[in-house]
Amino acid sequence: MLEATQFEYDLALLDWHLELGADEAIGETPINRYALEKPAPKPKPAAAPAPHTPITAAPVAFNSTPLAQACNSLDALRSEVESFAHCTLKQGARTTVFCDGNPAARVMIIGEAPGREEDREGKPFIGRAGLLLDKMFAAIGLSRHEAAPESALYITNVLPWRPPQNRDPKPEEIALMKPFLLRHIELVQPDFIVTMGNASTKTLRDTALGINKMRGQWGEVLGIPALPLFHPAYLLRSPEKKREAWADLLSLKARLDGK
């Protein structure tokens, strides 16, 4: 009786499975009935079309030559430089360092850029390097404080603003401000130009040679005799070069004396 009941029970259970759709008693792979089904991955949103970017030409560096050439006096040039807003160096500088000395001087000295002391005082070549420069030229009878043109000096820089942390000027900064420097020379019209150090010598003599190879070699800038000298800041670091600097000063003295 018990066997018949079990058989009937199993047969009823099999019929019930068939009604549910089961068609195989044993599958090929085991199935974990307790595992949760993984959710179907969400469809990725369609990528937005890239915005249309018009093709434009690369920005052209500002041409400062027309502004510089329009200045007909040193006062006008100073005003133009002080209001010039296209050089980023101006943003970090305290002052615009334009010049010092007598504009009627026979000798025009051109340095690189203002340092910390120059930026604070608004004059070129002060501090330790400036004191040495004054002593160097005093030895041949020249001074920035003299009124007489034959014994006076006029001093300026390639750049009127201090580069951050006294770094070397960048080529694009020099190129931007060079027209103002050339106009400065044209307005002063000195008898002789002295380029102090690498930056001013390379800028005005259009050379890649460093000051060690250029010092003492006379050339011309805008038709004016020009002599490269060691920068006084370099002489403070390398006092053994003072002998060569003295020889170059004597060469300038000879030219001034017509020898």
Image: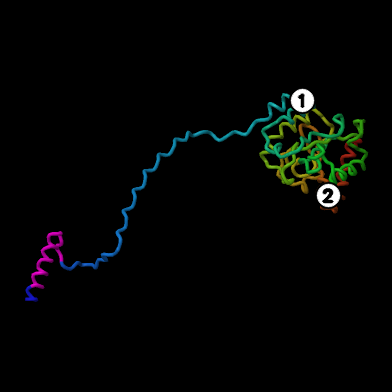
Q: Main secondary structure of the magenta part?
A: helix
Residue 127 image position (x, y, % from top left): 84, 44
The tag on residue 58 is none
Of the two numbered discs 2 and 1 on the same chain, state the one appearing first in sequence.
Answer: 1
Q: In the rendered image, which quarter is residue 164 located in?
A: top right
Residue denoted by label 1? 76
Image height of 24 relative to 65, above or below: below
Q: On the rendered structure, is 9 left or right of 134? A: left
Residue denoted by label 2? 235
Question: In the image shown, does 36 or 146 lie closer to the viewer?
Answer: 36
Residue 138 image position (x, y, % from top left): 92, 41
Task: Tell me if I can see residue 217 in this picture.
Answer: no
- Which residue type carries mark 2? Leu
- In reply to whether residue 136 is colored magenta, the answer given is no
Label 2, label 1: how many angstroms apart (C-alpha)? Answer: 35 Å
- Which residue type carries mark 1? Ala
Image height of 184 relative to 126, above or below: above
Task: Tell me if I can see residue 102 in this picture.
Answer: yes
Bounds of the magenta segment: 5-24
